[in-house]
Amino acid sequence: ELLVAMTLAALLSVVMFSGLHFGRKAWETAQSATAGINDVRRLQEFLGTALSRAYPAHTGEATLSHVDFSGDARDLRFLAPDSQTDGAWAYVAVAETNGRIAIRVTPELGDNSSQDDARTVPGALTLSYYGTKKGTQQPQWYAQWQDEPRLPTLVRVAVSGNHDLKSTTDVALRVDAPADCVFNPLTHDCQER
């Protein structure tokens, strides 16, 4: 009887430890998935805020002027108010390489060594741009937006994270001004000359 009791106790302890191991693995998987969801949510929230405040600064010759906004399916760079310094501007650059999304915020008048914010998030990024390009009449979606006289009207940010997480957000840019405009930040419109 003692031998049978010891055998049953050993079997019960194996089953109990297996259950604890299974519970720990389930907890770790859920925690990892939650962290991935939070990373994607923070990335989209940051991009949404920065893009909605994009500034239509113009560059180039007067006849070839275009807004300082450059984007394709995997990379995006634009000028927006600096969230760290009141009254300052910063370039926001977002790029996806090797399964990681890198975000860099560089002061407008600084160099690359004076970056005030840099972060990476695991995942894949797909960007598209909605608006009217020069030479077209109707707005439509484009995979690239470069050297245009206006900012796009919308930017679609699609992020794929860990655990087959996919999230898409359309961000409306508040400013619709041509590159030769003298922009008034109070009225969000061109000033009269």
Image (cartoon, rainbow, N blue to C red):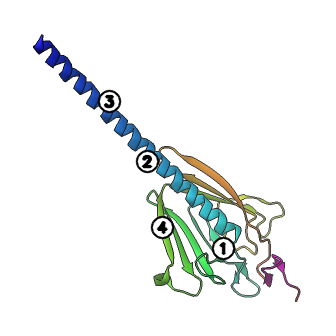
Residue 128 higher or lower than 115, as above or below: above
Q: Reading the chain from its start, which is encountered first: label 2 or label 4?
A: 2
Residue drawn at x 73%, y 66% as measured from the top left: 173
**Label 3, label 4: how far apart the Cα atoms are:** 38 Å
Determine the secondary structure under disc 4.
strand
The residue tagged 3 is: 19
Residue drawn at x 61%, y 64% as measured from the top left: 47
Q: What is the x, y in percent for residue 127?
A: 62, 59
Q: Reading the chain from its start, which is encountered first: label 3 or label 4?
A: 3
Please identify, in this view, whether the residue under mark 2 or under mark 4 is nearer the observer.
2
**Label 3, label 1: how far apart the Cα atoms are:** 55 Å
Magenta residues, as a range?
183-191
The residue tagged 1 is: 69
* Tag of residue 135: none
Q: Amino acid at mark 1?
A: Phe
Q: Reading the chain from its start, which is encountered first: label 2 or label 1?
A: 2
Determine the secondary structure under disc 3.
helix
